[in-house]
Image (cartoon, helix red, strand yellow):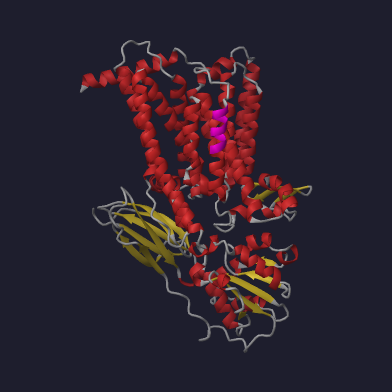
C-alpha cells in the first residue's frame, strides 16, 4: 500500500512538472479558420435551442420575475431613478434589462412574445460565447459537443425562457467574462481591451443583479490561483507604484461592493450551514435535471431522474483520475500533457466550488435561479477533463475513447431530452399549471380590457396576478389595478383595526373588481380566506361574477362591489365570520417510495392558524432541530430523504420557537 501511494504521489508530481514545461499561455494554438461546416453546425445548434426555448412560447404563463422590469421599461416609476432614468427595479436588481427593452416595447408592445423572444436571442449569444471559449481552449469538435450539451440542458432552456431570477443577462455576462479573461491571459500585456471588456462585463453583471458578485469573487480567486504565472509575467516591468495603485483600486472596489451588498444579506446560522450544503447540492441536482421547474410549474409534476445533475461532476472526477492513471503507465517523462486543458478544468472547478460555497453561506439563496449560476462551469470542467484524458492515450486508443465518451454523452443527452419532453407535453395543456404560472393570465388581461372599463378599481387579492395584468392590460385599465394581497394576507379578525380595514376595503361609493385564484390554484390561501371573511363581515358587499369564460373560471375568481351591497354588514366576531383554518403540517408522499435513487424527495405542506408567520424545523434521527422553512404556509420540497433515517418536521407559531402547532414524521421505504 505504501509503495502504491508513493507511486501515486510521484505521478501527480510528474504530471504537474511536465505541464509546467509549457506553463504560460498559449499552450494550444486555437484554430483561427472557421470552415463552412463548422459555421452551419453552430447555426443549427442555435436554431435547435431557439426552437426548444420558444416552443409554446405562452406556456408557462408570464411570471412575477420576468415582469419586474416592465414598469420601468414602459415609463412607469421604478424603484430608484435619477433624472427620470430608471436605475433600480428592485433593491438588488438594476434597470439594465429595462433599458434594453424600452425600444422593444415601444415598437412591439408588451406581450409574451416581445418579453421572451429577446431573452432567447440573448441566450443564443451566451451559447455562442461558450462555443468560442471551448474552441479556444480545446478544439472545434469538442466545442460542438459542449454546445450541444448546453442546448438540451433543461435548467438552461426552461429558466432562460421565462428569465426566472432573472438569469439571462447573468449567464451572458458570465460567459463574456470567461472568454475575455482567457483572451487577456494569452496576451503578454497587462492592460488590454480584453481586460477592460472583462471588467466592464463584471460591472454590468453586478448592476443587473447584485448576486453576480458570487461569480466575480470566484473568477478573481480562481484566476489568481491557476494563472498566477501569467499574471506575474504581465506585472514584470510594471512600476511598483502602479501595481500598488491597482491593488488599492481592487480593495476599494471590494469594499464598495461589500458596503452595497452586506445590508441586504442576513448572516447565516452556523449550525445550519452543514444542512445547507446538502440542501443546495440537492437543489443543484434538481435544477440540472429539470426537476425544479417541473415541480414549481405543474400541479402534477412528472417524475424526472436526477442522475444527470451529479453525473457531470462524477464524470469530471473520473476523467481526471483516468488521465492520471494512464499517464503513470506512459514511458518517458517527456510525454506531452495538454496543460491548457488541465488548468482550464481546474479553473472551472475552483469557480464552481467558490460559487457553491457562497450560495450555501447566503441564507436568502435557495432557488433554482441561484444554483443555475453554477452552469455551465460543471460542463466546462467535464469536457476539459474528457479532452485531457483522451489526449493522454495513444493515437489508436483515442478513437476508442472518443467513441465511448460519445456514447456516454448521448445517454446523458437522451435523459435531458426526456426531461424537456416531459415539460413540452404539459405545455399543451393550460390546466396543468399551478395558478401563479398559468398561461391564462393573458386571457384574463383580455377579459379586463373589455369588462374593466365600467369599474373604478381592480384589486388583486392573491400574489402573482397584479404585475402581469398591469403590464398586459391597456394603459387605462392597467392604471386601475392595485396589488392588495398584503392587506388581505395580514388581516386578522383579532386585530383592533379589523373592522376599520373591512370598511376601507369595501367602499360603497367605489365600484371595484376583486381578482383572486380559485382555492386549488391559490398562492397564499390565507389571503383568499381573509378576503372571503372580510366580505362576509361587510354583508357580502362583493358579489361573485358568474359571467366569465369557463377557461378563466378554472383558475381565477372575480368579485364585484360598489353596485349596492346586498344585506347588512355583519358584526365582528359573530357566527357570520368564517372560522380560521386549523394549523396543520403534512408530507406527501410519506413514506417516500424506494427506487428514486440515492435520495428520495417529499413535499412538506403546512399552514398556520389565521395566517400568522410560522417556522418549520426538521430533526434528523433524533438530533438537533434545524430550520427548514418559514412562512404562514407551504409547500416546500425536501429532496434529500435517505433510507434508514427518520425526519421529524415540526411547525412552530411565530418566530420565538415556543408554541408547537404540529409535527409529521417522514421515513423512506427500503429497497
**Looking at the image, which residue sits at the far right?**
83
Q: Residue at x 49, y 39 (%)?
A: 150
Q: Is residue 647 left or right of residue 182?
A: left
Q: Is residue 457 left or right of residue 296?
A: right
Front-most of 199 and 403?
403
- For residue 21, above or below residue 203: above
Q: Which residues are magenta?
A: 36-44
Q: Does any portion of residue 266 appear in the rendered image?
A: no
Q: Is residue 324 left or right of residue 519?
A: left
**Quadrant housing the N terminus:** top left
Q: Is residue 40 magenta?
A: yes
Front-most of 641 and 581?
641
- For residue 524, above or below residue 238: below
Q: Is residue 415 left or right of residue 146?
A: left
Front-most of 562 and 435?
435
**Looking at the image, which residue sits at the far left?**
1
Q: Residue at x 35, y 27 (%)?
A: 401
**Spot occupied by residue 447 in the image (x, y as percentages of width and height):** 66, 69
**Spot occupied by residue 473 in the image (x, y as percentages of width and height):** 69, 63
Chief SS of the magenta region: helix
Quarter of the image for residue 628 reads bottom left
Q: Does any portion of residue 639 appear in the rendered image?
A: yes
| Number of numbered discs overlaid on the protein picture | 0
Q: Residue at x 27, y 53 (%)?
A: 645
**Spot occupied by residue 331 in the image (x, y as percentages of width and height):** 31, 12
Quarter of the image for residue 534 reads bottom right
Q: Is residue 558 magenta?
A: no
**Spot occupied by residue 110 in the image (x, y as percentages of width and height):** 69, 55
Quarter of the image for residue 314 reads top left
Front-most of 664 and 164?
164
- For residue 117, above or below residue 662: above
Amino acid at each position: 500500500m505504501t509503495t502504491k501511494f508513493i507511486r501515486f504521489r510521484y505521478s501527480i508530481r510528474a504530471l504537474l512538472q511536465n505541464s509546467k514545461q509549457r506553463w504560460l499561455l498559449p499552450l494550444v494554438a486555437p484554430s483561427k479558420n472557421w470552415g463552412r461546416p463548422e459555421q452551419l453546425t453552430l447555426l443549427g445548434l442555435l436554431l435547435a435551442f431557439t426552437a426548444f426555448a420558444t416552443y409554446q412560447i405562452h406556456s408557462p404563463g408570464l411570471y412575477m420575475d420576468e415582469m419586474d422590469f416592465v414598469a420601468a421599461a414602459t415609463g412607469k416609476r421604478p424603484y430608484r431613478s435619477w433624472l427620470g432614468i430608471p436605475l433600480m427595479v428592485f433593491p438588488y436588481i438594476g434597470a439594465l434589462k429595462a433599458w434594453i427593452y424600452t425600444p422593444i416595447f415601444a415598437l412591439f408592445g408588451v406581450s409574451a412574445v416581445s418579453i421572451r423572444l429577446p431573452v432567447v436571442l440573448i441566450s443564443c449569444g451566451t451559447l455562442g460565447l461558450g462555443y468560442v471559449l471551448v474552441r479556444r481552449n480545446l478544439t472545434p469538435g469538442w466545442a460542438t459537443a459542449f454546445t450541444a450539451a448546453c442546448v438540451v440542458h433543461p435548467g438552461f432552456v426552461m429558466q432562460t425562457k421565462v428569465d426566472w431570477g432573472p438569469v439571462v443577462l447573468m449567464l451572458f455576462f458570465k460567459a463574456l467574462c470567461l472568454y475575455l479573461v482567457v483572451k487577456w491571459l494569452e496576451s503578454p500585456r497587462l492592460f488590454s481591451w480584453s481586460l477592460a471588456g472583462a471588467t466592464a462585463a463584471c460591472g454590468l453583471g453586478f448592476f443587473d443583479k447584485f448576486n453576480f458578485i458570487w461569480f466575480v469573487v470566484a473568477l478573481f480567486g480562481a484566476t489568481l490561483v491557476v494563472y498566477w504565472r501569467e499574471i506575474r509575467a504581465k506585472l514584470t516591468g510594471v512600476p511598483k507604484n502602479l501595481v500598488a495603485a491597482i491593488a488599492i483600486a481592487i480593495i476599494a472596489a471590494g469594499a464598495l461592493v461589500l458596503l452595497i451588498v452586506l445590508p441586504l444579506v442576513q448572516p447565516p446560522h452556523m449550525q445550519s450551514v452543514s444542512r445547507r450544503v446538502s440542501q443546495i447540492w440537492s437543489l443543484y441536482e434538481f435544477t440540472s435535471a429539470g426537476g425544479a421547474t417541473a415541480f414549481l410549474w405543474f400541479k402534477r409534476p412528472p417524475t424526472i431522474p436526477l442522475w444527470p445533475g451529479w453525473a457531470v461532476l462524477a464524470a469530471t472526477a473520473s476523467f481526471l483520475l483516468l488521465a492520471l492513471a494512464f499517464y503513470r503507465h506512459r514511458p518517458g517523462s517527456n510525454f506531452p500533457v495538454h496543460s491548457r486543458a488541465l488548468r482550464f478544468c481546474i479553473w472551472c472547478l475552483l469557480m464552481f466550488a467558490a460559487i457553491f460555497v457562497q450560495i450555501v453561506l447566503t441564507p436568502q439563496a435557495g432557488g433554482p435561479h441561484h444554483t443555475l449560476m453554477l452552469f455551465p462551469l460543471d460542463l466546462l470542467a467535464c469536457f476539459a477533463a474528457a479532452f485531457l484524458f483522451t489526449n493522454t492515450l495513444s493515437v489508436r486508443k483515442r478513437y476508442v475513447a472518443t467513441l465511448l465518451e460519445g456514447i456516454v454523452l448521448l445517454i446523458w443527452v437522451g435523459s435531458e431530452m426526456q426531461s424537456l419532453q416531459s415539460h413540452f407535453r404539459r405545455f399543451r395543456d393550460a390546466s396543468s399549471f399551478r395558478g401563479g404560472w398559468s398561461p391564462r393570465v393573458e386571457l384574463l388581461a383580455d377579459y379586463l380590457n373589455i369588462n374593466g372599463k365600467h369599474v373604478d378599481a381592480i384589486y388583486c387579492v392573491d400574489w402573482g396576478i397584479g404585475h402581469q395584468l398591469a403590464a398586459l392590460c391597456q394603459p387605462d385599465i392597467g392604471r386601475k389595478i392595485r396589488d392588495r394581497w398584503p392587506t388581505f394576507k395580514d388581516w386578522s379578525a383579532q386585530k383592533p383595526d379589523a373592522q376599520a380595514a373591512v370598511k376601507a376595503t369595501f367602499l360603497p361609493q367605489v365600484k371595484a373588481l376583486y381578482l383572486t385564484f380559485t382555492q386549488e390554484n391559490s398562492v397564499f390561501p390565507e389571503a383568499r380566506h381573509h378576503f372571503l371573511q372580510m366580505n362576509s363581515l361587510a354583508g357580502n358587499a362583493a358579489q361573485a361574477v358568474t359571467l366569465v369564460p369557463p377557461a378563466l373560471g378554472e383558475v381565477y375568481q372575480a368579485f364585484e362591489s360598489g353596485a349596492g351591497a346586498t344585506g347588512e354588514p355583519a358584526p365582528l366576531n359573530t357566527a357570520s365570520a368564517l372560522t380560521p383554518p386549523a394549523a396543520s403540517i403534512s408530507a406527501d408522499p410519506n413514506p417516500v417510495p424506494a427506487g428514486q435513487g440515492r435520495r428520495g424527495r417529499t413535499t412538506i405542506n403546512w399552514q398556520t392558524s389565521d395566517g400568522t408567520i410560522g417556522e418549520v424545523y426538521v430533526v434528523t434521527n433524533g438530533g438537533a432541530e434545524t430550520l427548514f422553512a418559514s412562512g404562514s404556509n407551504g409547500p416546500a420540497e425536501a429532496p434529500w430523504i435517505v433510507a434508514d433515517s427518520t425526519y421529524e418536521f415540526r411547525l412552530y407559531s411565530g418566530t420565538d420557537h415556543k408554541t408547537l402547532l404540529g409535527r409529521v414524521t417522514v421515513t423512506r421505504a427500503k429497497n
